[in-house]
Amino acid sequence: MMHKKFAHRLLLQISPPNEHIVLNDPWRPWWQRYQPISYKLCSRSGSENELRDMISRCNKVGVNIYVDVVINHMCRAGGGEGTHSSCGSWFNASKKDFPSVPYSHLDFNNYKCRTASGNIENYGDKYQVRDCRLVSLLDLALEKDYVRSKVADYMNSLIDMGVAGFRVDATKHMWPGDLEAVYSRLHNLNTSWFPGGSRSFIFQEVIDLGGEAISSSEYFHLGRVTEFKYGAKLGTVFRKWDNEKLCYTKNWGEGWGFMPNGNALVFVDNHDNQRGHGAGGASIVTFWDSRLHKMAVGYMLAHPYGVTRVMSSYRWNRNIVNGKDQNDWMGPPSHGNGSTKPVTINPDQTCGDGWVCEHRWRQIKNMVIFRNVVNGQPQSNWWDNQSNQVAFGRGNRGFIVFNNDDWDLDVTLSTGMPGGTYCDIISGQKEGNRCTGKQIQVGGDGRAHFRISNRDEDPFVAIHAESKL
Ligand code: LAG
Ligand code: CA
């Protein structure tokens, strides 16, 4: 039997844990971790032993680890020669020599790429996108059995340590057949933590907003795929840009032209688009707009579409000039030697020292529990005011109400929930036999009265089966 504490299963994606380049200009940007030097497990986050220790401590408390694997490329073509790397491995970027893997110039897509610069110049040409260099990064020849075996060995070393799966970086830039060959070599998950025969959960990063040569669907048979339209559209809706209204999300999901529910990995923001990298643009809602962010993440977690991912961030000196953040490169809170500082936890359980930890915000943490409590239930009892006030349930297990209008919400709704007194999990939660925030009375007929001021700290209310007194 599952221990109660484990009933709410949590998944955790970590930054690339392998050896990466170390850069001085700009100083230790976060994106140095997307420039591999080898598959040794030491990064600015720590050593192999520290990684192993984290994986086993997390697995013990029901938090499974998913690793961001950068397997399309190594460091930048002009990345120099020397030991400016996180484990101190020597490399020579201009000779394409990475002896700690080892990879030599034979392991890269050299003349296979037909552009003059050797870089991707036209996203309308799928050969360029797969065989040329993404932003000058040395492109691996994944068609080679040798390269496939090195990549699979790296992923297997992580599986054997106890990780549960992978976020595959830059998937669009790799041929589906090459990925299939790599995935087919992966071990089953470690039976110290997972049932025998378990396979990795794989989600692949493909930016497909439409209008390019490569479509997300080319990767559906290999694993889940990121749906970048989701956060871009949800941000537009919550910001009320382009005349969008929350009531238009009645058919949210496939009805909005997103990929099939069973293929999608969805998120409000990610490490790229929260700072203007990647895709999504200005509509993306991040912790910098915390009130909207809590609402958008709440909406995502309440809605049945997709497998959901919550972002957890650090703060940086954001400095937007003409729409571009001049400090979009700034890395996490770091020591003088560039290693990442530990996350400090305040007495109230929030994070300190520059760590934002959205996943610890009460509203977001409680909505993750909501999602688990309503798991498997269909969307039900939709209501809207033809503007930005909407409500919906998940069978008889949960109900949520949003007020993103500039006036109060005051309405009686059918919730589908059994009668009783429920604690709102946004303004507070259930503690013992009382609510620390608002209480919602559901009548024997399933109807309940909701009042949400547009000036509330968080203008939404959510109740679920386990928040009942
Ligand atoms: C990804 N997904 O496909 C990651 O989500 C994204 O964070 C990675 O880019 C990218 N693919 C490559 O793994 C990040 C930064 C880039 C950065 C790159 C390499 O968003 O800005 O490029 O990592 O570190 C940087 C400079 C470029 C330069 C390149 C090589 O911004 O101008 O050409 O380094 O020097
Ligand atoms: Ca490639």
Image: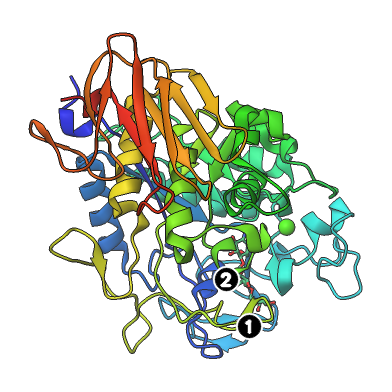
Label 1's element? Answer: loop
Q: Amino acid at mark 1?
A: Gly
- Residue 450, given in percent of the width and then of the height, sits at 36, 31
Q: Quadrant of residue 435?
A: top left
- Residue 51, given in percent of the width and then of the height, sits at 30, 59
Label 2's element? Answer: loop
Label 2 beta carbon within 8 A of ligand 1: yes
Pick whichever of labels 1 and 2 is earlier in the sequence: 2
Q: Measuring 40% from the left and 49% from the top, which residue is drawn there?
A: 158
Image quarter (top left, top right, bottom left or bottom right) of the C terminus: top left
In the depicted view, which residue is nearer to us: 117 or 370? 370
Q: Is residue 390 above or below residue 445?
A: below
Badge 1 crowding class, 10 Å Cα cut-off, few under 14, some 14 to 19, many 20 or more, is: many
Q: Measuring 45% from the left and 77% from the top, which residue is drawn there?
A: 331
In the depicted view, which residue is nearer to us: 118 or 352? 352
Q: How far is the residue under mark 1 from the one under mark 2?
A: 9 Å
Ligand 2 falls in which quarter?
Answer: bottom right
In the depicted view, which residue is nearer to us: 360 or 2? 360
Q: Is 258 placed left or right of 355 in the picture? A: right
User: Could one spot residue 405 in this view of the protein?
Assistant: yes
Q: Look at the image and name its color scheme.
A: rainbow
Q: Is 463 placed left or right of 31 in the picture? A: left
In the depicted view, which residue is nearer to us: 400 or 179? 400
Q: Which mark is residue 35?
A: 2
Total labels drawn: 2
Q: Which mark is residue 79?
A: 1
Badge 2 crowding class, 10 Å Cα cut-off, few under 14, some 14 to 19, many 20 or more, is: many
Q: Measuring 80% from the left and 67% from the top, which residue is drawn there?
A: 110
Q: Are marks 1 and 2 in contact (CB under 8 Å)?
A: yes
Q: Is residue 184 above or below residue 457?
A: above
Q: Is residue 41 above or below residue 94?
A: above
Label 1 beta carbon within 8 A of ligand 1: yes
